[in-house]
Amino acid sequence: MKLATSFTSSQGQRFPAPDVSRGLMLLFIALANIPFWVVTTSSSAPSDAADTAWLWVRTLLVDHRAYPLFAMLFGFGLATMINRRVASGTRSYLSSLPGVEAGREPTSQEETWAREQATVDARRLVRRRGLWMILFGAAHAALFSGDIIGTYGLAAAVFAGWLARRHRKRAMAVCVVITIAAITTMYTMGSHLAAQGLTSAAAMQQGTGESSATLLSYISGSVTSWAGNSVATVLFSMVVPAMFLGARLADTDLLAHPERHRRLLTAIGLGGLGVGAAGGIGYGIWATGGTLAAWTAPLHEVMGLAGACGWLALLALYAGGPTADGRMTGLRRLASAVGRRSMTAYLSQSLLFATIFLALPTLTGIELHLGEARAAGIALAVWLATVGLCAVLERGGHAGPFETLLRTAVARSERRRRLPVPPVVAAPAEPATSRGVYDLAR
């Protein structure tokens, strides 16, 4: 089955796997982001056995696995949006041609013209959406320099044409180049740090937090750091390869009907998580107090994509395929509500983290001293709070406010373009009369 339109069929049936995966993926994002707040606010405490155990779990299964998973779902969503726009746009352009509404069949040249115009519209839509996401990310970066919305927006804006026109060979080539660049850069940095003697995680974290002496210095430093990190993430991480991989999934039914591919998805899920965990062992040794080897960071980064594939496969299996009545219950229903409001949930996480780690200590004078395990508990509580928020919005029939804002901004910023003239249809030749045929025969 080819997903030519969207997650939803003409009868309004919704495929749950993408939404449920996004909703549960945001828990991984919260777990991956909270170390930033702990380090930034100097809230860490001496580690104990529970902290060490959690560090191993987070390193092998969450860190550098959550964001590639997010990127795959982002690429899947972009490709689905493109497919929908091209299909509906082609029909619209064909219906505008003279004589088509009266029953005339369009020619192959007209169909090619209509599809080309629809593809251009889809490319412009993705690029416009990406540019707005960069702006949203810049605003978010004033609070959280680890923002990923702007990074994904940058990737969408740069590669909008390749996504719309399905330049798969070019995409594969750039993914290979980016992977090599990521490996080379991280290996070089690891070698340099090892040569300088900065091989422990504790030494690396000293002085890495944002300056919070004043509000202005925090905001300026955060936005500056975000801008540089966004470009570096696009060029030297697995975000772009993950995005193109997710876009390729939109041409399959692996996420639309995971119940049809249980064996394959189970193998990918267990195998991907296993390979990802194996690739993170060296990084885990460093994170729990060992020394940093030059090869640990690049291996952890590249194998993170395998781990992300494993998580996506298992989450799709958990979500299952569409039901006859389209209803879901329990955690699936809650996760789906979060997944359809993923931007709102993601930004709400930052607001809650800032309240806990910045606002409350300032107002109460209480200093936080958290270990890794307690910090993870706060991340879980924050995710549960966003689940409650999205459940309330779902019950009221409301979309996420930030999704609505982005959709409105993208729609209102659309500009008309001059369309090329459609191909001219030659008038049908008049049939020869019997007299004319007779004369020619003579």
Image: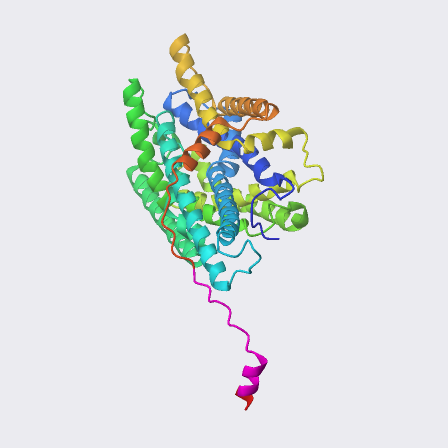
**Quarter of the image where the C terminus is located:** bottom right
Image x and y of residue 148, in percent: 41, 35
Name the residue furthest right. 324
> Is residue 292 in sight in this rendering?
no
Q: Look at 57% across and 40% down and name the residue there.
A: 18
Q: Is residue 141 magenta?
A: no
Between 102 and 246, the one nearer to me in the picture: 102
Between 351 and 187, the one nearer to me in the picture: 351
Image x and y of residue 221, in percent: 29, 27
| Circle count | 0
Q: Is residue 386 above or below residue 247?
A: above
Between 337 and 40, the one nearer to me in the picture: 337
Q: Look at 52% across and 29% down and name the residue there.
A: 54
Q: Is residue 437 magenta?
A: yes
Q: Is residue 249 above or below residue 406?
A: below
Image x and y of residue 364, in percent: 41, 8
In this rendering, would 50 be left or right of 237?
Answer: right
Per the rendered image, the range of residues in magenta is 423-439
Image x and y of residue 49, in percent: 52, 26
